[in-house]
Image (tube, rainbow, N blue to C red):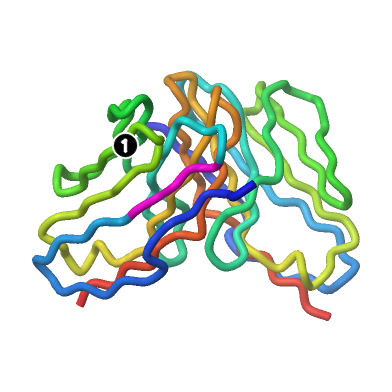
Amino acid sequence: EDKVVQSPLSLVVHEGDTVTLNCSYEVTNFRSLLWYKQEKKAPTFLFMLTSSGIEKKSGRLSSILDKKELSSILNITATQTGDSAIYLCAVMKTSYDKVIFGPGTSLSVIP
Amino acid sequence: DAGVTQSPTHLIKTRGQQVTLRCSPKSGHDTVSWYQQALGQGPQFIFQYYEEEERQRGNFPDRFSGHQFPNYSSELNVNALLLGDSALYLCASSADFREQFFGPGTRLTVL
């Protein structure tokens, strides 16, 4: 059965810290891996990763996919209180675009 | 450009009742996916609609049904509500196997 696992499930850091969130997957017919940030309701899109080893960056956030290890990491540098949210990892399959989500990592950034 | 919209925002029903949730996709998107997100969990895929047909379905009973209209908007219907159906219901739209954009969700409470 398809599975997406995230670690840690929750994390508390101080402002200015750097954090690394992990995602691993066991999914047949992999197409791409996605990261979303969920603050209150709607998850907002962060990254889509399709190719292994190519880092994607957006401001203080970056992410990379390792298709050999079936995993991805999301890095956040110089964290701010506004980074507090649940970070969801998801995998899109080649069978149309069914998306399988992990449980999420709850990040709390304290001043 | 309007994003994905959902209605209603909140809904309270009693066990055994039926509910209809609505979703309008982002402009230019033709695919609508529905997810159920229980508290503390990642979104679980319910089904996906494309060209007015159900194209993919997750592990949800037949009590969950849907529809897509010619303008790509979609409805999710849940019959014979159970307490366990209480959750945030998210609609996401996409096109051409690209990233899904989520609506704000409908919070359903079953008493």
- Screen quadrant of the N terminus of chain A: top left
Q: Quadrant of residue A87?
A: bottom right
Task: Please name whichever residue, A19 or B97, is drawn nearer the observer in this view of the structure.
Answer: B97
Secondary structure that dominates the magenta span: strand
SS category of the residue bearing label 1:
strand
Residue A57 placement (x, y as % from top left): 84, 40
Apparent side of residue B29 relative to residue A78 in the rendered image (left or right): left
Apparent side of residue A106 relative to residue B64 in the rendered image (left or right): right
Image point (31%, 71%), residue name? B11
Q: Quadrant of residue A33?
A: top right
Image point (23%, 72%), residue name? B110
Residue B47 placement (x, y as % from top left): 33, 38
Judge whether B8 appears above or below B20 on screen. Answer: below
Q: How many marks?
A: 1
The residue most toward the bottom is: A111
Image point (49%, 25%), residue name? A93
Residue A58 placement (x, y as % from top left): 84, 45
Image point (48%, 43%), residue name? B25
Q: Quadrant of residue A32?
A: top right
- Screen quadrant of the C terminus of chain A: bottom right
Judge whether A68 appears above or below A17 on screen. Answer: above
On the image, numbered disc 1 is attached to which residue?
A: B68
Apparent side of residue A36 relative to residue B5 in the rendered image (left or right): right
Chain of the residue under label 1: B
* Magenta segment boundaries in residue numbering: B22-26
Magenta region includes residue A8: no
Dot 1 amino acid type? Gln
Task: Please name whichever residue, B60 or B105, is drawn nearer the observer in this view of the structure.
Answer: B105
Q: Residues within 10 Å of mark 1 (few under 14, many from 20)?
A: many
Judge whether B47 appears above or below B103 on screen. Answer: above
